[in-house]
Image (cartoon, helix red, strand yellow):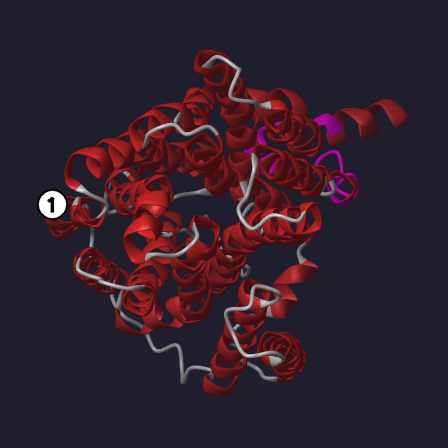
Amino acid sequence: MTDAAGSSPAPLKADPRMVAAIVASALFMQNLDSAAVTTALPAMALDMGVEPARLGVAITSYLVALTVFIPLSGWVADRFGAKRVFMAAIAIFTLASVLCGRANGVPEMIGARIFQGLGGAMMVPVARLLLLRQIRKEEMLSAMAWLTMPAMIGPISGPPLGGFLTDAFGWRSVFLINVPIGIIGLALVAWKIPDVPPGDPGPPDRIGLVLIGLALALFMFGLETIGRGVMPPGLPEAGLVLGLMFGWAAIRHCRQTPRPALDLSLLQIRTFNQGTLAGSLFRIGAGATPFLVPMLLQVGFGKSASEAGLVSFATALGALAMKPLARPILRRFGFRNVLIGTALLAAAGVAVAAAFTPAWPLWIIFVLLAFGGLFRSLQFTALNTLSFADVPTSRLSAATSFSGTAQQLAPALGVVLATTSLEISATLAGHHTATVHDFSVAFLVAGAVVAASCPFFLRLAPDAGEEVSGHHAGAAKRAAAE
């Protein structure tokens, strides 16, 4: 990969496929944790004496912490060395998992999940940064597949493993499974990943980091608590208003400062803009599904955690099956056509879950979820690759921080979308606990949000990202015109 000045790439110090597979151990641990915790949520809620939908804060608090701290990850990686930061992040995530497993109430769980989010915030974008600095553009699509395929084992094994552990040993064991994984990951990184020497990125944008952190934390606090009666009247609304105000101030600051916490000028790169912003809309709708499916199966259908886990992992299984096909499909059809088509198909895959009832055989639900996972996986691969297709090497740290912030905020908003849809539907129907009908409403809302990303993808050029995908429709059309 060359930078904006056209300098030659640095010599590769290790096989990019090996680097991708090893750093994916961090993504595996994080994805395993997220998938397993969702399956264990009803048991956690029962043990802590709260409604399952309201314990969604255990998920959103972690995701918000990720989002708040990710803007700092690029600067920290440049300042202290990406490998060193990556290893510290794995250690923090593992320790926080132990604290989650020892929590005895919702406040303790939220505190431990926020600490866990700090580790995850440094872990995932720095892992991607380690990989991107080892590859050339023509290797990017293949390397991203190597990065995501091992990481997909987490979502595949997470739901059934989380269900089994919850039924056999209790929900606390779901967090403790991260300990051996973290230790193995640390050993592999120390042994095989090349050192990345620290640099001098200059002082961090402290004002920008504070403004962004306050904006995200207050806004998500307001969304998570508004209308639920868990906070004094007016406090959630105040959180929303203050979050928006701090967000406006953060945007103004980042546009004016020379080294901002979030480099908004990256949005001038069309492929990064579409992959990050339009992709976020897709991720919000898709992010509601991993929360809704195990909840529907346990709360709505009365299934055990193990049964719910075995069915829920169908989505991730479909996603894994798609990974080897992503490269030839993108080469054949190009980013624009793939993003539009898979957004529509994925939206249908989410919305069809609104028809699920206890009378449906579980194997049919499994098959439909697996097909939905196929299209969501292709969409995620296309979005992740397109976002960095035209980013110069010199701006990769800023781009991974920006993209990582957007990618982690979207699932948090997806969980809020799911819980809010359930709450509003239940309130309008006049009952206090979610029913199968309420879940149907939530799936339809999530499917509509996924479909809403299509008009934005229509704005992409037919040859967008062709250097990465190998699809040259734009060149063929220009030749025909001439």
Left or right: residue 475 versus residue 217 is right
Residue 24 appears in which quarter of the rendering? top left
For the view shown, which residue lies furthest in the right direction?
481
- Residue sitting at x 26%, y 45%: 29
| Residue 6 at least partly seen | no
The kind of residue tagged 1 is Pro
Residues 379 and 438: in front is 438
Residues 356 and 432: in front is 432
Q: Main secondary structure of the magenta part?
A: loop
Give the magenta-colored segment's residue range: 456-473
Q: Is residue 271 magenta?
A: no
User: In the figure, 462 relative to 233: above or below?
Assistant: above
Q: Mark 1 Cα within 10 Å, few/some/many (few <14, many 20+)? A: few
Left or right: residue 242 versus residue 140 is right
Q: Quadrant of the C terminus?
A: top right
Residue 31 appears in which quarter of the rendering? top left
Residues 471 and 10: in front is 471
Q: Where residue 183 appears, x then y in whole percent?
A: 11, 49
- Judging by the rendered image, the residue that carries numbered circle 1 is 180
- Residue sitting at x 85%, y 22%: 480
